[in-house]
Image (spheres, grey):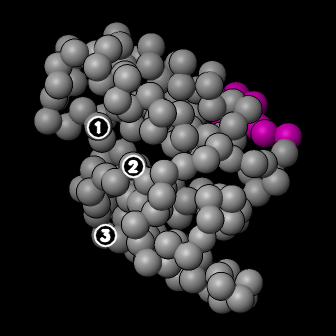
Amino acid sequence: MDDFEDYYRKRAGALRRYAAAIVGPGDADDACQDAWLRIWRSWDDADPDRRDAWAFRVARNSCLDRRRRARPTDPLDEARLPPIADFSDAVHTALDADAALAVLARLPLPAREALWLREVAELTYAEIAEVLQVPIGTVMSRLHSARKKVARQLRAEGR
């Protein structure tokens, strides 16, 4: 898939939802606009075999830049995140989309990002490590911790 427009059509929604998970829905569109401009400018320089991880990393960096420039006035756990695709992990299958978003919003950002990239974007551990610029062991640790916290929250809510 070497065509930018095809790639944009395929991944724009996923990058938008990922941005919303990081900066909240209010700033996600602006962060994505910055990210897509960066992606378009560097499109020919990116490795086609690693384009997904690269694009998510560009989106993440755009979100982090936006967060540094203006701290959100509402904590993310109070924001309503946009709907996401279904989770394949057994911990999440019992949740409806709204409950899943509420649970995700209560996780710390590193855990929320790792879980979102794995379960929603369906990236591999190696791709997540590349996006987050951390070792694979850190990805595994964050996913384990996130899943345990989600399971604990679900038990506390009687699910």
* Label 1 packing within 10 angstroms: few (<14), some (14-19), many (20+): many
**Spatial distance from mark 3 to mark 1, Cα to Cα?**
20 Å
* Label 3 packing within 10 angstroms: few (<14), some (14-19), many (20+): few
The reply to whether residue 114 is in sight is: no
Quarter of the image for residue 89 reads bottom left
Circles 3 and 1, Cβ within 8 Å, touching? The answer is no
Quarter of the image for residue 25 reads top right
Rendered view: 151 above or below 107: below
Of the numbered discs 2 and 1, the one sitting upstream in the chain is 1
Q: Position of residue 77 (x, y in %)?
A: 76, 57
Q: Which mark is residue 121?
A: 2
Q: Nearer the viewer, residue 156 or 87?
A: 87
* Label 2 packing within 10 angstroms: few (<14), some (14-19), many (20+): many
Q: State the residue at coordinates (63%, 32%).
A: 28
Q: What is the span of residues highlighted in magenta in the rendered image?
A: 64-73
Q: State the residue at coordinates (43%, 78%).
A: 90
Q: State the residue at coordinates (44%, 54%).
A: 120
| Quarter of the picture holding the N terminus | top left
In the picture, measured across the screen, residue 2 lies left or right of residue 71, that is left
Circles 2 and 1, Cβ within 8 Å, touching? The answer is yes
Give the main secondary structure, helix, strand or loop, of the magenta stretch.
helix
Circles 3 and 2, Cβ within 8 Å, touching? The answer is no
**Spatial distance from mark 2 to mark 1, Cα to Cα?**
9 Å
Q: Position of residue 11 (x, y in %)?
A: 38, 32
Q: Which mark is residue 137?
A: 3
Report the residue marked by disc 1. Answer: 52
Rendered view: 125 above or below 144: above
